Image: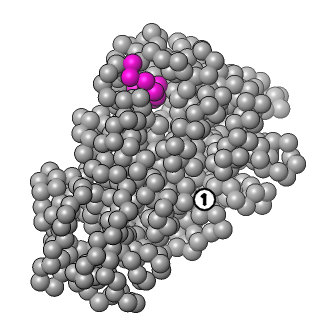
Amino acid sequence: MRTVMSFFIKSSLLSVLFLLPVTCTSYHRVKRNIDPEKEIFYHLFLRSFYDSDGDSHGDLNGLCQKLDYLQELGVTAVLLTPLYDSPFYHNYFPTDFYRIDPEYGTLDNYISLLKEMHRRKMKLIMDMEIHYVTNQHEWFRDSYMNPASPFSDYIIYRGPDNTDPEPILWNIDTTRAWGGQMVSLWTTNLYNPKVVDYQHRLFRYWVDPNGDGDFVDGVDGFRIDHIMDNLDWKNIRTDLLQKFWKPLFTELKMINPDLLIIGEQADWGYGDEYFMKAGLDIMFNFPLRFAFVTFDKQKIMATADSAYSRIPENKSEIIFVENHDIDRLASDVNRDLSRLKIAAALTILFKGIPSIYYGQEIGMTGKFVKFGDYDTNDILRREAFEWYTTVAGSGMALWYKDSGPWWTQTNLRDHDGISLEEQRSDSSSLWNFYRNLICLRSMNPAIQTGHFEFIQNDQEQVLSFIRWNPKQTVLVLINLGNAQTQLNLERSSFLKGPIQKEILYLMGIEKTAPLSEKGTGFSVALSPHEIQVWQVNGVK
């Protein structure tokens, strides 16, 4: 594939590009003062990213040192997995909500990172999961078998005298952390006014740590992990979206109206009820992700129609193909570069907020492996970012090295083409393709925040759609199949304004004569898995 291009092709024939028929709904939403669809998210597993102090754990200072890299790629916002102290390597079950894991650094390191990100006009999104605590948390340690504890009602107890605490999702009560220690996990009481007050204070703290009203040291948003209305589907704490979450989000927006509140729906569905009941700004588009990885035109179109029609005015969804809970796509497609590039195009060019999971941009591999302990089964989806041609190298975050069978089965290999060092200088690499796509998006407002419409065509394997605003229309053609095809698009009369006679070829395989007249429309050849992007000039 060639890189982003800027050259004009002039011909009266090309005016037909303005007359493409729309077959699906035009999705339009009211703009906010801050439009999150201008952002490029980078979903980052901090422990595995970059180690600044030689202990093999990715850390806050390491992330700060790699902000140049993220900006080179085109990233504008970083979505971090949790920072708080926990016996688990992923930090999802806290021992202290306020204390940053010392392997990540200090509060001062965190504040320095935030200030540097804000100086660069970047955003930081903090991941929060507050439904559960470990047996090492003060609430549990003081209240277990002690009804007189001031924290007696902070944990849900099922039996008398605080002897039978409520386990977490799937009734998990005890599991082994990756370091070997056994840890029990318990459910917090989100109906308790004291817990509610505590959590409000906690979130307010991260929004404005020193309380001075200047958010230079405050987080730009929150990702709420595992958000749900009926906690763990047990019918013990219900209607949480309106009773607990909506008042919290309302208060936070009163402090800083520009905060982005993101929900990861526990059911991995469309998320429309979370918008309506909790007032969230952004949800993850899980159904569209699962449609993308089928590479099936009809499934993608049907799912997109359903997903986009459910999004309320002034709300957005994250468009993604990978995260820390899903097998890496490169493993699922056996490192098929053409399919990885198609997935990149779908992520970056569809309507929504693109999110790239760290290492996705270089085609890192990794799948779920049942090692026997809950905490370790996802390690191979969360391996060290591959900075270098060889696994050894300064800053490699090999925190799990020689610690168990997950290291024996590591996907990291020397000289396998999966590293930033190997791909940066290769113009045809996946990394350069991501970088060029992101650049393309940033230079074309219609792709960033414009409307989205599918375009009818006569090929079963070719996905065609436009992104448009009143000043610009961009046409995207993606051949999902592995055979060359001749695509035919018909004229229509739905467009208003003067018909232009030139288009701008933005991305694709360079051709001397890319289009030819055919009856009432035009025809274009598409190679197997080819992606073409055109700007159509004029007013829609």
- Name the foreground residue: 185 vs 524: 524
Please tell me whether residue 280 is drawn above or below residue 46 in the rendered image: below
Crowding near pointer 1: few (<14 within 10 Å), some, many (20+)?
A: many
Give the main secondary structure, helix, strand or loop, of the magenta stretch. loop
Question: Label 1's element?
Answer: loop
Residue 403 visible at all: yes
Q: Position of residue 12 (x, y in %)?
A: 25, 83
- Name the foreground residue: 523 vs 371: 523
Residue at point 63%, 18% (across, down): 53
Q: Which image quadrant: the C terminus?
A: bottom left
Residue 405 shown left or right of residue 75 in the figure: left
Does the magenta portion include 343?
A: no
Q: Residue furthest top?
A: 402
Does the magenta portion include 381?
A: yes
Amino acid type of disc 1? Leu
- Look at the image and give the residue range highlighted in magenta: 380-390
Q: Which residue is mark 1?
A: 280
Q: Residue furthest right?
A: 212
Residue at point 61%, 41% (across, down): 127
* Residue 159 occupies quadrant: top right
Residue at point 29%, 71% (across, down): 9
Residue at point 38%, 35% (across, down): 425
